[in-house]
Amino acid sequence: EEMGGRFVERREEGGAEGRGEWENGVEAGETRHREGPGGGRKRPLPRSATVAAENELATEGGEVAFVGRLIDESTRLRSAVKFYTTMLGKKSSVAALLGRLAREAEGEERLRFTSGELRQGRTQRWLLIWTFCEEVKLPVRPASLDLVVRDRTRDGAMQWIRDLLSALRIDIVADGEDEEEEGEGRRLECRVTAPTWLRKARKRRRRGKKEVEVHSNAVPVTPSVTVTPFTPLSLTVTARAPVTVTSSPSVTLVFGIEDDSRKRDLSQLVVHLANKLLVAQ
C-alpha cells in the first residue's frame, strides 16, 4: 500500500502468537528493521529492493527488441561512440542478438562484436559488446564442438572425417600428430572457403549447372542480386583417445576455431557431419 508518497509493504512473520509488521521503506534517512516475535529488532532490511518504475522494468518485445533498437541506433552513430555494451538476462536472447549483429556485419566490415558471461553465485547474466572503431581491440575467444563417432578406432574416425571434408571441398592444409594429446593423437588443420554443407549452396550449384546447359548459347547476364561472400574459416579437427562405451569403442572428434563469433558456421558444419554419421550407422 502507498502511504504519504512512501511505499509500505506489510507482512506477517511467525505464528499466531508472534506476529509483527515491518515496513520495506526508508524515509528521511530512517532505516527500517524487521520486528521479531517478541518485538525485538532483527537485521536491517535489504537495500536492494526494486525502486524502478514499471516502464523501466518492461518494454514491448522484451530485451531482444530493446537491444535491437540499440543496434539500429549504433548503425547510425557508428564510430561516434567507441563501443556499445548491453547486459542480457535470458540466454535465449544471446543467440538472437548475435545473429542480428552477424547479419549487420555482413554489409559492414568495420563492425566487430563479441559476447561474455557474468556469474555471481547462482545468478548469471550475458554481455554483448560491439564497435565500429578499428582501434578498439575486442577479445577473441576460441570455440569448439564435439562429435562422438562410435564403433570406430581413432584412425578409422580420422579417415572417415578426411573423406567427408574432401567431399565438401574443405582443404586440409596440415595432417599430423596432436602434441597436446597423449599417445597417438591426430590433428587436422583445415581451411574452409565456401559453406558447401548448406542446402542452398548445393541447390545453387545444381541450378547453375542447369542454367549452363539450357543457356549455353545465350549471352550471359549479370545477376542483379549481390551474394555476400563467405569469409574463409580456419578450423582444426582433433581425435581424442577412445573411450570404452559398453563393448564398443568410441572416438570424440573435437572441431575448434579461434574466433567464437564464427561458431554458427562451425555448428552448421558439425550438424551436417552428424547427419552423415547417422546415415552411415
Image (cartoon, rainbow, N blue to C red):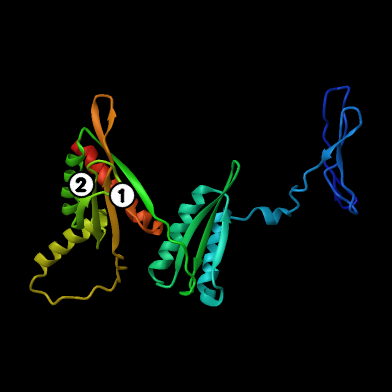
Identified by mark 2, the residue type is Ile
Q: Position of residue 174 (x, y in %)?
A: 20, 57
Apparent side of residue 78 relative to residue 56 in the rendered image (left or right): left
Q: Is residue 280 above or below residue 70?
A: above
Q: Residue at x 18, y 49 (%)?
A: 162
Q: Residue at x 18, y 57 (%)?
A: 169
Regarding residue 66, the answer to whether it shows in the image is no
Identified by mark 1, the residue type is Phe
Q: Position of residue 184 (x, y in %)?
A: 22, 42
Considering depth in this image, is 224 or 65 the residue closer to the camera?
65
Apparent side of residue 152 relative to residue 240 in the rendered image (left or right): left
Q: Position of residue 273 (x, y in %)?
A: 25, 46
To which residue does mark 1 refer? 255
- Give the structural element (helix, strand or loop) at label 1: strand
User: Within 10 Å of the Cα at label 1, are there few (<14), some (14-19), or many (20+) other Cα atoms?
Assistant: many
Residue 99, by quadrant, is bottom left
Q: Residue at x 29, y 44 (%)?
A: 181
Apparent side of residue 131 relative to residue 195 in the rendered image (left or right): right
Mark found first going from the N terminus, 2 or 1: 2
Residue 55, by quadrant, is bottom right
Q: Position of residue 63 (x, y in %)?
A: 57, 55
The extreme left residue here reads 217
Considering depth in this image, is 21 or 65 the residue closer to the camera?
21
To which residue does mark 2 refer? 161
